[in-house]
Image: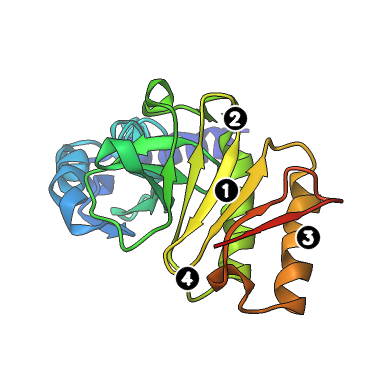
């Protein structure tokens, strides 16, 4: 028992020893525009012994940044720490908003980064707010799923989606006509029908003004 208590006190003593203060922190996944804030987050750790480190709370300020998907800090008694940052990846840009983007979960977020060329999504003005999960009456996840399918169907074509206040979705192609999907009801079926039409007539969208898939079992083609 005495040896156990002696060992326990030694471990506790090591944890509170100044020798266990974090001397080196490796920052992983940090973009340039977040570097200064990330370094400031870990700067004060050099005065804190290992046992007093709040490893969960250290990265909390970074997690509040809308560009950050997650941030975690870990350290060991040898004075080494790692701050790992995962950035939120935009999948579309909201047309009316400057730098408000949609992420892969369908959430809208305001960003300080200038994203690469992305599909454009137009939504009702009242729907444009950071943290929103709805594009008007349409869930963001439905838009993300549709965008994923469109990248497969039109890999070389720039496109933009529009969601009106009633939740009606339409697609406009840069070098082609418009596809009207209507509501999100039976959206998977509408995407499947669109794929079959394009397989049968690959250049169709360059020849027509509008393809109406509101009723997927009765697609309507409107030519120039």
Q: Residue furthest top?
A: 126
Q: Secondary structure at mark 4?
A: loop
Q: Are marks 1 and 4 in contact (CB under 8 Å)?
A: no
Tell me what residue is drawn at x 32 percent, y 35 percent.
Answer: 58
Give coordinates of residue 202: x percent, y percent: 66, 79
Circle 1 sits in a helix, a strand or a loop, which is it? helix
Q: Which quarter of the figure is the C terminus placed in?
A: bottom right
**Vertical arrangement, residue 109 with respect to residue 189, above or below:** above
Answer few, some or many: residues within 10 Å of disc 2's Cα (few below 14, many 20 plus, some between 14 and 19): some
Looking at this view, is 52 or 13 the one in front?
A: 52
Mark 4 surroundings within 10 Å by alpha-carbon count, few (fewer than 14), some (14 through 19), many (20 or more): some
Q: How far is the residue under mark 3 from the one under mark 2?
A: 20 Å
The chosen color scheme is rainbow
Establish if 83 lies above or below 203.
above
- Which residue is disc 1 drawn over? 144
Circle on res. 192: 3
Q: Identify the residue position indicated by label 4 in the image.
A: 157
The reply, left or right, for residue 103 in relation to residue 149 is left
What label sits on residue 56 in the rendered view?
none
Pointers 3 and 4 in contact (CB under 8 A)? Answer: no
Residue, disc 2: 167
Marks 1/2 in contact by CB < 8 Å: the verdict is no
- Does residue 100 appear left or right of residue 159 in this picture? left
Instruction: Tell me the CA gap for discs 3 and 4.
Output: 18 Å
Q: Quadrant of residue 170?
A: top right
Disc on the earlier residue, 3 or 2: 2
Q: Residue furthest right?
A: 217
Q: Secondary structure at mark 3?
A: helix
Q: How many marks?
A: 4
């Amino acid at each position: 028992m005495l040896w156990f208590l002696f060992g326990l006190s030694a471990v506790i003593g090591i944890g509170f020893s100044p020798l266990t203060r974090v001397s080196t922190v490796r920052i992983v996944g940090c973009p340039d525009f977040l570097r200064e804030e990330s370094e400031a987050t870990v700067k004060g750790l050099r005065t804190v012994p290992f046992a007093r480190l709040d490893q969960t709370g250290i990265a909390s300020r970074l997690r509040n940044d809308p560009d950050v998907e997650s941030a975690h800090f870990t350290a060991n008694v040898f004075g080494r720490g790692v701050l790992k940052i995962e950035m939120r990846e935009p999948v579309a840009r909201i047309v009316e908003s400057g730098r408000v983007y949609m992420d892969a979960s369908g959430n809208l977020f305001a960003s300080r980064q200038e994203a690469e060329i992305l599909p454009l999504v137009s939504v009702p003005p009242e729907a444009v707010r950071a943290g929103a999960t709805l594009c008007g009456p349409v869930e963001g996840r439905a838009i993300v799923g549709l965008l994923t399918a469109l990248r497969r169907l039109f890999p070389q074509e720039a496109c933009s989606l529009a969601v009106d206040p009633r939740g009606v979705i339409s697609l406009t192609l840069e070098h082609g006509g418009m596809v009207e999907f209507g509501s999100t009801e039976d959206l998977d079926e509408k995407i499947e029908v669109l794929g079959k039409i394009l397989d049968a007539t690959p250049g169709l969208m360059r020849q027509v003004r509008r393809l109406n898939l509101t009723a997927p079992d009765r697609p309507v083609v409107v030519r120039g």
